[in-house]
Amino acid sequence: MNNEKLVIKNVRLETGFGYTGDEITHTTTDLFTITILNGRIDSIERGQSPAAGVDGKGYLMLPAFSDMHIHLDKTLYGLPWQAASGKRRTVKDMIAYEQQIIPELLKTSTDRAMQLISLLQSYGTHYARTHFNIDPTSGFDSLRHLEKALENKKSSFGAELVAFPQHGIYYTKTKDLLKEAAKMDIGFIGGLDPYSIDGSIEKPMDLIVQLALDNNKGIDIHLHEAGESGIRTIEYLVDKVNENPVLKGKAFVSHSFALGHLSPSATEAIAEKLAAAKVGIVSSIPFRGTIMPLPTLFKHGVEVLAGNDNVQDHWSTFGSGSMLQKANLVAQLYGYATEYDLSRCLKIATRGILPLDDEGKQQWPKEGDAANLVLVDAGCSAEAVSRISPVKSLVHEGRVAKVSI
């Protein structure tokens, strides 16, 4: 337990929406003193406090950010710059390439994972859902090295782990490795394009679901397939979750590009199914070729998470590490330009936590909440999203992880 006490004075909190006529045109704020004890918010006092404490300098306090799809185990971050090659065009091309480079990458993967975590923290991220390779080339070394990095950062960063069969379950001999990984201290069983990589939707998906059930894990599969097989895979998972309700709220489909190629009526129909089964979608917010139907998913109450996915690796040249940038991208892609709409986009960075509810009532922070927060150089959430405002400080479970105030 974190028994440290932290007092932050002169921080700005949102208190409500301001109106011009019937339109929300601004966000009201005030200055507060926040006392943190044992990793939780102990008290919230309006105005200045005479007690000693850190001066928040009027910066806006927001929930700390969460990156819900990233690969900390195989980043090139920390190595000399290297753009992605245009010669490797398919997932199977990438599998063959990984089989060549992973043995060398593993030699320094712990250090590079720690450097990438530090980058995420600099942008206000305190938590990640990170996938790690489980395949015949990596064995369990990707996991072991990642665990070392997370152990070294445990006082300032949290994570949940996904066993990811990046090279297929049956395409390479990964089945037994995945079964062994399922018994370990991880949170999720992963998967990869069952039809195009393993030649079947049912066979790999049945194994993934059964491993999750047998080992009390969640599910988070990569699904890049954009055609009929992609939709069939999503529907197959929805059916399996409905057959096994214990998986509701614990099953996710990452990328789900097939959702971006449906008619409006088909999109509405599958969004209803996802919401009813409580199957979530995790997106890196693509904007080249495939535009995800996030507004429809939001409308139906589908849990939508987001992540950077790649930050300088052999899959993609792009990736900043900033979750606030992802929120900004959502606002730009879907035309969320008003004060109200911009403020709602913050949930992409915070895993759904917003300072104000949809009616403008203050709902965060509350006394007793986990002390995971950022101080941002902005006047309100809408401004922070619109301008991708600089993060000045990050607090994880009551401990200062980054400070520049």
Image (spheres, helix red, strand yellow):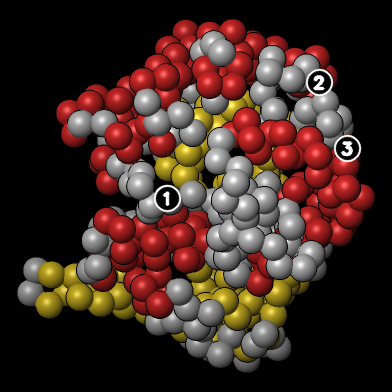
The relative height of residue 89 versus residue 270 in the rendered view (above or below) is below
Tag 3 residue: 141
Q: Is residue 257 above or below residue 28?
A: above
Q: Which mark is residue 177?
A: 2
Q: Residue at x 49, y 23 (%)?
A: 248
Q: What kind of residue is marked 3?
A: Asp
Give the spatial CA distance, label 2 vs label 1. 31 Å
Q: Quadrant of the C terminus?
A: bottom right
Using a 10 Å C-alpha cutoff, classify the residue at mark 2 as few (fewer than 14 neighbours), some (14 to 19) or many (20 or more). Answer: some
Q: Nearer the viewer, residue 229 or 308?
A: 229
Which quadrant is the N terminus positioned in? Answer: bottom right
The spot of residue 2 in percent (x, y) is: 80, 59
From the viewer's side, name the closer residue of 131 and 297.
Answer: 131
Instruction: Please give the name of the residue rendered at 66% of the width and 72% of the height, measured from the top-left corner.
Output: 122
Mark 2 and mark 1 lie on one chain; the one further toward the N terminus is 2
- Left or right of 365 in this view: 392: right
What amino acid type should be assigned to the residue bearing mark 2? Leu
Q: Residues within 10 Å of mark 3 (few under 14, many from 20)?
A: some
For mark 2, give the secondary structure.
helix
Marks 3 and 2 close (CB-CB < 8 Å): no
**Residue 247 visible:** no
Q: Residue furthest right?
A: 107
> Going 70% across and 74% down the picture, which residue do you hit?
402
Q: Position of residue 125 (x, y in %)?
A: 62, 62
Foreground of the two, 355 or 332: 332
Is residue 182 visible in this depiction of the protein?
yes
Q: How many marks?
A: 3
Q: Is the C-beta separation of discs 2 and 1 under 8 Å?
A: no
